[in-house]
Image: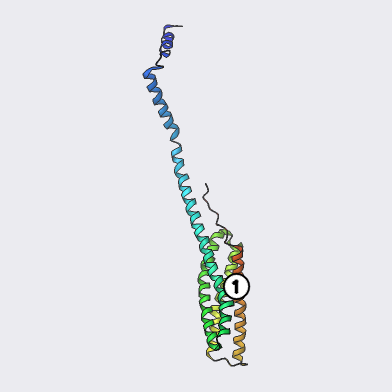
């Protein structure tokens, strides 16, 4: 063992350890090394947090959309069944004046049709959005489209024709009365089809969620 090795051995064998000089240097080295390894994690935390915020926002908006769809669909379908198969029959049974009962029923059906047009458009837009690129194969989209088409035909075509016939007067056994009966029959079929399709949507529950690009 030469002199240099003996001095190093004695220096390392001190009770205080490596001494204040090397201890300070070692602590600084550890601090630098810790900072060196902690730095790469900082850039990664930002995109993860941003992705998490986007994911939570999408999930919150989707839950709100599904709840809104349930409310709109319930009001629409409930109104169809409540007015068409409860209020109107009771109205004709309670009123002796059938002309007045018919006018009141026509007003209620007109309001129901307007509600159906507004709610149907909103529901259809939501269904197309959630279906994404596969909306042409989504049965819910086509069901809502059929319901909306039935309401539009009844409101914009059949009801004005029926109102025009009633304005000219309906005499039992006349050609106008026969035409009114045919139009009323077609309108009743479309109304029943819309009501049944609405019940199918209610039973099936809310539509599936649109796939999200952001995953955690």
Residue at horizontal 51%, vertical 63%? 68
- Residue 22 in view (yes/no): yes
Numbered marks: total: 1
Image coords of residue 124 (percent x, y)? 54, 66
Query: Residue at image x 50%, y 77%?
Result: 111
**Quarter occupied by residue 29:** top left
Could you tell me residue 97's position as x and y percent? Answer: 54, 89
Tag 1, which secondary structure?
Answer: helix
Taking 42 as reference, is 58 above or below it? Answer: below
**Above or below: residue 175 compared with residue 63:** below
Q: Is residue 30 left or right of residue 88?
A: left
**Residue 106 as seen in the image, left or right of residue 43:** right
Q: Residue at x 56, y 71 (%)?
A: 78
Residue 172 to residue 129: above or below: below
Dividing the picture into quadrants, the one containing residue 19 is top left
User: In the rendered image of this protein, does residue 141 appear above or below residue 175?
Assistant: above
Instruction: Return the residue found at the far top.
Output: 2
- Rate crowding at label 1 as few (under 14), some (14 to 19) or many (20 or more) other CA atoms within 10 Å: some
State the residue lying farthest toward the front: 94
Residue 168 location in percent, x, y?
A: 53, 91
The image position of residue 159, as x and y in percent, is 55, 81
Q: How is the image coloured?
A: rainbow
Report whether residue 163 is seen.
no
Q: Quadrant of residue 90?
A: bottom right
**Towards the viewer: 80 or 126:** 80
Question: Which residue position is annotated with label 1?
Answer: 195
């Amino acid at each position: 063992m030469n002199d240099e090795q003996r001095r190093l051995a004695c220096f390392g064998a001190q009770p205080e350890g490596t001494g204040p000089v090397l201890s300070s240097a070692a602590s600084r080295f550890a601090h630098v090394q810790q900072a060196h390894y902690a730095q790469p994690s900082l850039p990664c935390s930002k995109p993860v947090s941003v992705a998490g915020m986007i994911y939570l926002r999408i999930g919150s908006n989707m839950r709100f959309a599904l709840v809104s769809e349930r409310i709109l669909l319930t009001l629409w379908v409930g109104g169809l069944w409540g007015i068409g198969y409860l209020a109107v029959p009771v109205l004709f049974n309670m009123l002796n004046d059938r002309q007045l009962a018919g006018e009141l029923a026509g007003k209620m059906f007109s309001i129901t049709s307007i509600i159906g047009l507004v709610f149907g458009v909103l529901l259809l837009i939501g269904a197309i959005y959630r279906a994404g690129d596969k909306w042409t194969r989504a049965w819910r989209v086509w069901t809502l489209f059929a319901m909306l088409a039935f309401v539009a035909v009844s409101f914009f075509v059949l009801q004005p024709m029926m109102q025009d016939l009633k304005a000219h007067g309906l005499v039992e056994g006349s050609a106008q009365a026969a035409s009114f009966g045919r139009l009323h029959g077609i309108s009743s079929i479309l109304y029943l089809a819309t009501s049944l399709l609405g019940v199918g949507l209610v039973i099936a529950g809310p539509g599936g969620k649109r796939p999200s690009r952001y995953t955690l």
